[in-house]
């Protein structure tokens, strides 16, 4: 099964980093967050990726073209018949990465529509290039295959960002720390989809999260796979630092490989 990753957005809320590189290439530790996302899927045996590129997509292309060069010890034989020998082996050697330029200003639905021609199977995965989770990919696929909707999303409860106050008749009675989880669920950005979604996608200006998913929901064609474990997006510099600190401290809850 193919894994489609949307990598083309501008990442304006993380301008400190994305002024120089696309958001999926912002590092968590020594590797870009895109690598971490791909490692999650590869752990479950899904190692055929389709990357929908846009903003600064050439940086992502260069990263994978030079992956072995930048991560291996190498021996070069110079002269008229030059040769390169790589001395390291990597778990990523069996990855297949298809990179397609879907346009600088194309919206999420438009990027997905362009990617569908590279997907031979009826079912595929879709996610964004800026979120990490330890949810069970195989279980979400099994859930999708059991219920047979067009879209299955992984529903998560993010960690609360702010503490709150308790009041009684406008009198503050206590201060509460940030809650572990917010009350409601949101889409965690990890999808299992059926290719039937194609008829819901229009042109490059189609925003997947608006009309297509809203219409599918009204038709009761969206199911939610509930995940109560770790999930964290990387929308801001603060969140990038949070994930980096987790990785560097050996407490990266998404590291299941």
Image: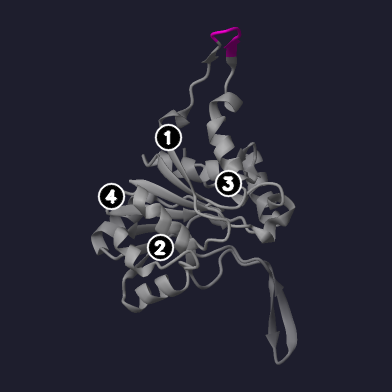
N-terminal-most mark, 4 or 2: 4
Residue 218 image label = none
Q: Is residue 76 found left or right of 18 in the rendered image? A: left
Residue in view at x 54 percent, y 26 percent? 68
Residue ID for mark 4 = 121
Q: CA distance from mark 2 to mark 3?
A: 26 Å
Residue 179's spot in the image, x, y percent? Answer: 61, 67
Q: CA distance from mark 2 to mark 1?
A: 24 Å
> Where is mark 2, residue-wise?
153
Q: Which residue is mark 1?
A: 95
Q: State which tag comes first along the sequence, 2 or 1.
A: 1
User: Can the viewer see residue 251?
Assistant: no
- Residue 176 is covered by the magenta coloring: no
Q: CA distance from mark 4 to mark 1?
A: 18 Å
- The residue at the point 45 percent across, 66 percent down is 208
Q: State which quadrant residue 165 falls in.
A: bottom right
Which of marks 4 and 3 precedes in the sequence? Answer: 3
Looking at the picture, does residue 178 appear above or below residue 51?
below
């Amino acid at each position: 099964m193919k894994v489609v990753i949307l990598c083309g957005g501008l990442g304006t809320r993380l301008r400190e980093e994305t002024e120089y590189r696309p958001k999926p290439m912002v590092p968590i530790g020594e590797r870009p967050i895109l690598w971490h996302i791909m490692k999650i899927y590869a752990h479950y045996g899904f190692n055929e990726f389709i990357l929908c590129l846009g903003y600064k997509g050439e940086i992502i292309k260069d990263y994978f073209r030079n992956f072995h060069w930048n991560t291996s010890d190498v021996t070069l034989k110079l002269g008229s018949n030059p040769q390169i020998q790589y001395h390291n082996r990597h778990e990523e050697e069996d990855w297949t990465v298809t990179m397609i330029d879907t346009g600088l200003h194309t919206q999420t639905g438009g990027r997905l529509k362009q990617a569908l021609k590279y997907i031979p199977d009826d079912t595929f995965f879709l996610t964004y290039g800026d979120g990490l989770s330890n949810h069970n990919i195989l279980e979400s696929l099994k859930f999708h295959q059991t219920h047979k909707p067009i879209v299955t999303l992984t529903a998560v409860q993010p960690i609360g960002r702010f503490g709150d106050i308790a009041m009684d008749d406008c009198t503050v009675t206590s201060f509460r720390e940030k809650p572990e989880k917010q009350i409601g669920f949101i889409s965690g950005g990890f999808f299992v989809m059926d290719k039937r979604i194609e008829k819901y996608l229009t042109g490059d200006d189609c925003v997947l999260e608006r009309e297509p998913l809203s219409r599918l929901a009204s038709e009761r064609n969206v199911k939610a796979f509930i995940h109560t474990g770790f999930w964290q997006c990387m929308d801001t510099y603060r969140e990038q630092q949070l994930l980096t600190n987790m990785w560097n401290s050996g407490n990266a809850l998404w590291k299941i490989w």
